Amino acid sequence: MLCELCLLIVVVLAINAYVIFRLTVLDESPCLCSDGKQLAASDGSENFSPHKLVFLILDFEDFENDISDTVKNLSSTEADVVIVSDHSPYPPLPLRNSESVHLVTTDTHLGSSVTESRPEFYIARASYVFLVPDGIRITGSLQNAVDFLKDIAAVDRTIAMVAFPVETVNLLCLDLKADARRWTLEYETAENDTVCDAVDSKEFVLLMSKETLLNLSSPFLRPFSNAVFIQTVYYGLRLIIARQRILSVHMTSLYESSHNKWKHQEAEQRRLRRSYEQLGFKLIKHVDGRQEWYGCGKDTGRCFGTVIDDMPEYIHLGRWTPPCCLRALRETARHVFRIFESEHVRYWLEGGSLLGAARTGDIIPWDYDIDIGIYQDDIPHCKHLSYIRRTGVALVDSDGFVWEKATEGDFYRVQYSQSNHLHVDIFPFYSRNGTMTKDTWFKFHRQDTEFPESFLQPLEKIHFIDVNVSVPNNVRAFLDFKFGVGVIENPRLPNTDAVT
């Protein structure tokens, strides 16, 4: 019995050792070619090239590409070439069987092993990686390029990459502000024309160490230039442009037909949107002042779900309100203000909205709605509110905003659209013996309390979200009364003691 147990232990240990060997020793890992066939292994230990340099190709299109000739050029350097795609390319890429050329498809399908869909396994033995676009041609000493990066990094540890431009291109150096908390990227022209955070083109080869690449949160995200620069700047890493032409880099022309050019641009836009979504950015500010929005709009849902206990999900993630949501809130509030002004409804900013106005003249950066108080007696003056009060039916006004009675109590709500429920809450107050009160209260709203009517007699104006709006006549005293003394100078996240 003891011998049988010993034999069983030996067998289990042998199986474990074999599994670990298959997962960690890349020489045993098969390679998928474009036609779905595995490259033949010679003896189980020579399947992968021992080279310490790898060319990584991420950006190419199925419908038109130069992958075959690009790979032929790169293979002449005796470095491995790893082509990464999120699907099996169709039509199949005409790749020759080679132990140094690997096509890795990252989508999951039956019959594939984890090693076949994980590009990092194919570059694990490399020391340095060249990220290259489709259509590139390179001549020159790769070792000289690596030595250049080593020498620069030894002097300045923040420089982790070298960009080798196509010879006909003069790369523009850019600095990049990645404000994850505000979901915003901002590009600026760099003061230095050689060392910076990013470049303004795709016509270059980017060299970095394997460790730099694999320490990124999503190292194989496309388009690779945008995605890599966003992630490296987050870690304080920069690049240097090799203007002395250490490598001779050329590029063939692609997408010359108008149809394929359009298809490529559409595909790039989809990849950009996906990359910004994955990395958590919704507003991109360009050097020329142009802005690109990748968040919610009138025809989409809002960027976050149900708010529980006054704490939106994004606060738990260490972020503030997405800029697209703040934009929608401003548009909705200005719309409501215009209608109330024109229909002579007495209104005033309430709660956190008034607090934001007192601090910065804008919405509190982590707030998710806008609160307005009105005199209940003025509801008949507003055609939308009086209709809802009379019929109980929501309505969509001529500008697409939705007016409705809130389901949570006796107050009203104006939503940005039928799809996007970012909203302004309108609370009807009435006077009772000189005290303003209402019929619906929220225990998680610190400011939700009665207050003297004298704060509203008279109302005053304050600049808020680029318009002048009505507020109580002593804003500081009103906020101190509702939130506690000193609340203007001491911003705190909801339901926490964390000072921002």
Image: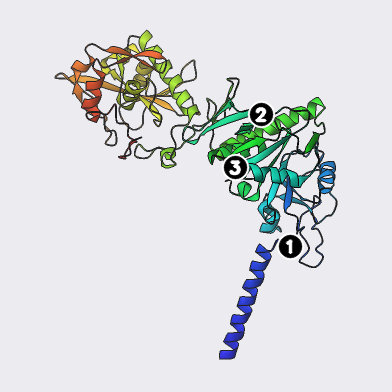
First reached walking from the N terminus: tag 2 or tag 1: 1
Please state if 289 lies on the left or on the right of 139 as rendered: left
The residue that disc 1 covers is 27
Q: Residues within 10 Å of mark 1 (few under 14, many from 20)?
A: many
Q: Residue at x 73, y 62 (%)?
A: 27
Please state if 121 lies on the left or on the right of 426 as rendered: right
- Given residues 429 and 231, the one toward you in this image is 231
Indicate the position of residue 18 as horizontal and vertical percent values. Answer: 67, 71
Q: Which quadrant of the figure has residue 344?
A: top left
Can residue 221 be seen at all in this image of the molecule? no
Gap between marks 2 and 3, in whole Å?
25 Å
Indicate the position of residue 339 as horizontal and vertical percent values. Answer: 39, 12
The residue that disc 2 covers is 200
Badge number at residue 155: 3
Q: Residues within 10 Å of mark 3 (few under 14, many from 20)?
A: few
SS at mark 2 in the image: loop
